[in-house]
Image (cartoon, rainbow, N blue to C red):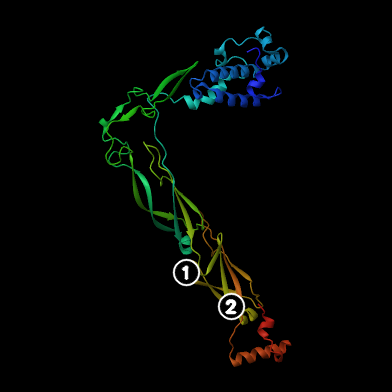
Amino acid sequence: MASKDYYRLLEVPKNATESELKSAYRKMAMKYHPDRNPGNKEAEAKFKEVNEAYEVLSNPEKRQVYDQYGAEGLKAGAGGGFGGFGDIFGGGSGAGVGDIFGDMFENIFTQGSGRGQSRSRRGGDLKTEVEITLEEAFSGVKIPVSVDRTENCEACGGTGAKDRNSVKKCSTCHGTGRVQYSQGFFSFAQPCPSCGGTGEKITDPCQKCGGRGRIRKTINTNIKIPAGISDGAIMRITAGGDAGSHGGPAGDLFVHVKVKNHSHFDRDEEDLIYTCPIPVWTATVGGKAEVPLIEGGRTAIKIPEGTQHGKIFRVPGKGMPVRGGSQRGDLLVKVRVEVPTELTQRQKELFEELAAIAGDKPAEKESFLKSIFGK
């Protein structure tokens, strides 16, 4: 090792920080780990060199000696020796290769203790779509839906076995769910390949589900849509998806809600918008207009004299419910002034008289309504 360049082994510059060293070590250790390179003696040797390099460079005192005198200075005792390969994983001085190594491979090689590892898996999520009216979105509604999903087999209770006597202790791992093996300097435990880490094997599978523990079914259910829901909202129904395997939790059902367009109302979040047509004379001299309400019925609003086309009046608390609350948005009434296209002779005379009073010249055949109420 005396001729080795520790910085080159870890592929870092000589001014590498502690964080850069740790990151480089993790990468190299994973690359050359014996378990990833079974039977590869060259990778095993490289793995030991990488660990030795990090043990030196992660220790400020050893790194200083190495930078000044090289590996020979360490061997001569200027910075202390390694104390054997066991020290690298025994938590000696420095940043602690053993700690980093343990963090990296704890989840990979430590499969828990006791009798086997659970095969339970969460079920898959499902999605569906429902379409409702604006009135239903206003009041809330229960919508029937059909969903194809997996359910636990009723015959075996989701175990996949014909009966209890069909479940035997795994002969490979003797019911522990783990097997031990050695590779070079290391000894690791991994899930038993025969039973998948459960410690049990099914000798006689359930005939109804074929040993899978689950079957495919069409489920008819009612979904409660809350009042005030918006178009495009996605509802999450907990445990409404596929059943989990081997006792695992069910997945969720995601419901995409589509609200149909309404013939009278437009929607802006919690506010409703209604376009109210009024005759030109009401806009001119004032009056009242009746507007429909989403909950049914009508209400009257006051139209002041001189109301212009496009004017918006607000009716508080007559919009959509605020989801999850007791308040409501507002109803916005947008005025559309309508100019009559057909007039009786008497109506025409009155408008021409009004035009004359206003200084217009009907003889020019320019419509008074067009000139005064152009929109």
Q: Position of residue 328 (x, y in %)?
A: 53, 60
Amino acid type of disc 1? Gly
Q: Position of residue 8 (x, y in %)?
A: 66, 21
For residue 172, side relative to residue 330 (left or right): left
Residue toward you, 212 or 369: 212
Residue drawn at 58 percent across, 86 percent down: 342
In the rendered image, the quadrant that contains the N terminus is top right
Amino acid type of disc 2? Ile
Residue drawn at 66 percent across, 13 percent down: 3
Q: Position of residue 347 (x, y in %)?
A: 61, 90
Quick one: label 1, few (<14), some, or many (20+) residues within 10 Å? few
Q: Is residue 169 visible?
A: yes
Residue drawn at 37 percent across, 38 percent down: 245
Q: Return the residue at label 2.
A: 278
State how far apart marks 1 and 2 are (Cα).
21 Å
Q: Return the residue at label 1.
A: 296
